[in-house]
């Protein structure tokens, strides 16, 4: 393998940041990662000058004007504006350095050698600003590597190494220097450098990366030699590859190593032990290379039966996977992974077959039988299901499945008792809530203790349970339902019932709020690279530097990158204890995106509550307009293509192909119209409509015939589809959360 040729990768791409995140970076061998110690993104070629919008073409052009308009500028417009500004002799030194950085980052994304050369010069200017110095130096090393200017690369990296504030930064610079030696075929220097990194930073990602490079050099050297030293060199390389795989079996170099070893495994199998084949199988398994893992394990003396069962199910050989799993349990009854593999198999079977399968698993006698019993119970009709739940609790009262098992036993008793016979269940529910206080079932138990009190005429005791539920779980579905029941007891109005909660029309102009730290910090970025990048609109790069102590900053950066799912996910991680408020972090977690379009469509379909529409859009797609589910539901409202075509036809909307349904305006129109139809089918009952939107109208009618809708709380608990049951709870939790956040705004 021509290592030097692979190292010379001016057209490669890397993710900015550390080159060697164990299992996450260094993608696709040297072509992607080794052109520099950090990253270089190479992509489209920009055109010439572009027409600037009026906000920039009228009056003097300033950097602040450009930065304020940046979100609405095309790449060509931004490039033209920055060039024009940098051509102004009156520009201040600071503005020149900042503008140089932004333009250089833009030029860095092109395939043009001229652009890269210009970027090199611009970064040299930008590095004179203290807040951009280190960042610019890393980018200089990237661009210089892409241009083949290794002297510049090394000079820059030597400077970064000398000024490194942490051992990690020093290791990163040394790693980049070692890569530079490889690109110029100075293999002895590269080898010495990687050995030093391995010695000085053995517990770091760079030490692990050094194992790969040293292994590759050793194998390459051995294959190029004809003398007696060749086999030994190859063996040294194999040992280094093995060390890498043990430390980073999911790293991108791991697959490169397996691919590199493939011909050696065939031509020189005596160089490899049974333990080697086992290790390579584990690496292939970790990378989800199921067939390759099976082939490698066949040559190993160690049986990987449980893993092999997973491989077979992933390869679609369900029957063989089933037989292999049962053999694995009998071989090692204590292997808890049987539940994971079993679920994969069961998900591919019809309910009767899955039930039979889990009974076979239980008959194989795994030491921890909870998962098998749980899966039997939830697929069995009553009373067999209740008997299984009781068996699970008897075998292991502390099982992870215990709270839900106790719940279904309790709910069965609620369903079959009346009047005073319900009274003992109050204590059952209260005790379970205390026993399983951190489980999802805990607020459910407390709420139903209150409901039973209500049913048996103990309003005061019911209110006590409801208040406890709301105090302990204020942002939970049952916390909100408790507020509604308290209001019902006192016969007072409540926003937390099943009524309509339309948001104020003025909220149609809602936009993402800025984090509180923003204004103060941008006024004085000082020497802080993070705030400098934020000021310049370099949001993607700033993600690597975001201060961990401020929970608002990372979600906000995702808003600037137009990534609502990541915004919501990151915000939810940092929600404070207590109920929802209008605080910024809650708005990030429950945004009012597409508020104008949602309000407009809800106004046209008068039955649809815009607050509820936001709730189901959030839960369906997290406002990701390109979302596609495993069942092929599309877009913001996750409408099925067949349904979308049907609604479009009824509304006389011409749709050329299914990709049109990703358009937010069309998707919202069709999804909200369909939800309006769901409401009409069930007499404007929002609970039944939400259940129908997820589970289908036919299913809801079947459940109504069995359960009735006199008590909607009981109806929700009795929905037999877990997905639909959870969906209804999630949508209404979001519904009441939205109202609580925005009711006073």
Image (spheres, helix red, strand yellow):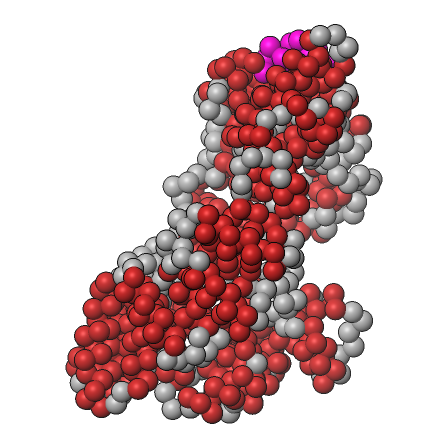
- Of 489 and 83, which appears nearest the observer? 489
**Most prominent secondary structure in the magenta stretch?**
helix
* Residue at (74% x, 17% y) in the render: 223
Q: Is residue 189 magenta?
A: yes
In the image, residue 732 lies in the stretch drawn in magenta: no
Please state the horizontal and vertical placement of residue 483, each as a whole percent of the image: 30, 76
Location of the N terminus by quadrant is top right
Question: Could you tell me which residue is drawn at 19 percent across and 89 percent down?
Answer: 420
In this picture, is 610 found above or below 363? below
Residue found 75% across the figure and 79% down from its top: 653
> Where in the figure is residue 514, as x and y percent of width and height?
48, 52
Across and down, in percent, residue 714 comes to 37, 83
Residue range (magenta) = 184-194
In this view, which residue lies farthest toward the right?
Answer: 48
Viewer-proximal residue among 413 and 699: 413
Q: Quadrant of residue 550?
A: top left
* Total residue callouts: 0
Q: Quadrant of residue 387?
A: bottom left
Residue occupying the point 51% across, 79% down: 690
């Amino acid at each position: 393998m021509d290592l030097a040729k692979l190292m010379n990768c001016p057209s490669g791409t890397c993710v900015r940041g550390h080159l060697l995140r164990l299992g996450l970076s260094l993608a696709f061998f040297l072509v992607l990662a080794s052109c520099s110690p950090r990253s270089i993104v190479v992509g489209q070629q920009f055109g010439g000058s572009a027409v600037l919008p009026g906000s920039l073409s009228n009056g003097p052009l300033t950097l602040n004007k450009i930065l304020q308009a940046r979100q609405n500028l095309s790449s060509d417009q931004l490039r033209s504006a920055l060039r024009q500004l940098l051509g102004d002799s009156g520009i201040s030194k600071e503005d020149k350095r900042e503008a140089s950085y932004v333009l250089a980052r833009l030029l860095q994304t092109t395939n043009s050698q001229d652009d890269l050369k210009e970027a090199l010069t611009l970064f040299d200017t930008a590095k004179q600003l203290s807040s951009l110095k280190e960042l610019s130096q890393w980018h200089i090393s990237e661009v210089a590597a892409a241009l083949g200017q290794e002297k510049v690369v090394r000079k820059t990296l030597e400077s970064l190494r000398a000024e490194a504030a942490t051992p990690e930064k020093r290791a990163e610079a040394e790693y980049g220097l070692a890569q530079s030696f490889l690109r110029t075929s100075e293999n002895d220097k590269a080898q010495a450098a990687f050995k030093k990194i391995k010695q000085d930073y053995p517990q770091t990602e760079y030490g692990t990366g050094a194992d790969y490079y040293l292994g590759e050099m050793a194998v390459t050297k051995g294959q190029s030699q004809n003398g007696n030293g060749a086999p030994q060199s190859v063996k040294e390389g194999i040992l280094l590859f093995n060390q890498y795989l043990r430390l980073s079996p999911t790293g991108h170099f791991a697959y490169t190593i397996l691919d590199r070893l493939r011909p050696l495994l065939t031509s020189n199998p005596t160089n490899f032990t049974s333990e080697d084949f086992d290790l390579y199988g584990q690496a292939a398994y970790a990378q989800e290379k199921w067939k390759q893992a099976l082939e490698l394990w066949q040559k190993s003396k160690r049986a990987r039966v449980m893993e092999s069962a997973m491989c077979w199910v992933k390869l679609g050989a369900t029957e063989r996977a089933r037989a292999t799993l049962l053999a694995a349990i009998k071989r090692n009854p204590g292997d808890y992974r049987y539940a994971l593999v079993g679920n994969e198999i069961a998900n591919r079977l019809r309910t009767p077959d899955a039930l039979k399968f889990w009974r076979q698993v239980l008959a194989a006698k795994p030491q921890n039988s909870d998962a098998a019993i749980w899966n039997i119970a939830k697929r069995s009709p009553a009373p067999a299901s209740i008997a299984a739940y009781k068996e699970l609790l008897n075998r292991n009262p502390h099982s992870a499945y215990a709270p839900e098992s106790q719940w279904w036993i309790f709910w069965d008793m609620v369903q079959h008792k009346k009047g005073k016979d319900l009274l003992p269940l109050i204590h059952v529910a209260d005790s379970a809530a205390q026993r399983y206080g951190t489980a999802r079932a805990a607020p459910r138990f407390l709420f139903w203790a209150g409901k039973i009190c209500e049913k048996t005429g103990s309003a005061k005791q019911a209110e006590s349970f409801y208040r406890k539920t709301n105090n302990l779980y204020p942002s939970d579905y049952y916390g909100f339902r408790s507020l509604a029941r308290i209001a019902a007891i006192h016969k007072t109005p409540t926003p937390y019932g099943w009524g309509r909660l339309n948001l104020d029309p003025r909220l149609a102009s809602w936009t993402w709020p800025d984090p509180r730290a923003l204004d103060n910090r941008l006024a004085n970025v000082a020497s802080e690279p993070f705030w400098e990048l934020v000021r310049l609109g370099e949001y993607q790069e700033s993600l690597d530097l975001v201060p961990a102590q401020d929970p608002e900053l990372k979600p906000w950066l995702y808003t600037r990158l137009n990534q609502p799912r990541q915004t919501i996910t990151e915000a939810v991680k940092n929600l404070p204890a207590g109920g929802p408020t209008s605080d910024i972090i809650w708005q990030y977690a429950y945004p009012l995106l597409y508020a104008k379009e949602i309000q407009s469509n809800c106004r046209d379909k008068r039955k649809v509550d815009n607050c509820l529409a936001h709730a189901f859009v959030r839960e369906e797609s997290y406002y990701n307009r390109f979302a596609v589910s495993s069942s092929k539901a599309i877009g913001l409202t996750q409408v099925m293509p067949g349904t979308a075509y049907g609604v479009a036809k009824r509304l006389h909307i011409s749709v050329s192909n299914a990709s049109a349904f990703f358009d937010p305006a069309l998707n919202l129109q069709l999804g909200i119209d369909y939800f309006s139809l769901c409401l009409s089918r069930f007499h404007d009952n929002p609970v039944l409509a939400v259940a129908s939107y997820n589970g289908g109208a036919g299913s809801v009618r079947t459940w109504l015939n069995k359960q009735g809708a006199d008590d909607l709380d009981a109806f929700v608990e009795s929905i037999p589809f877990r997905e639909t049951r959870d969906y209804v709870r999630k949508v209404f939790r979001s519904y009441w959360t939205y109202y609580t956040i925005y009711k006073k705004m």
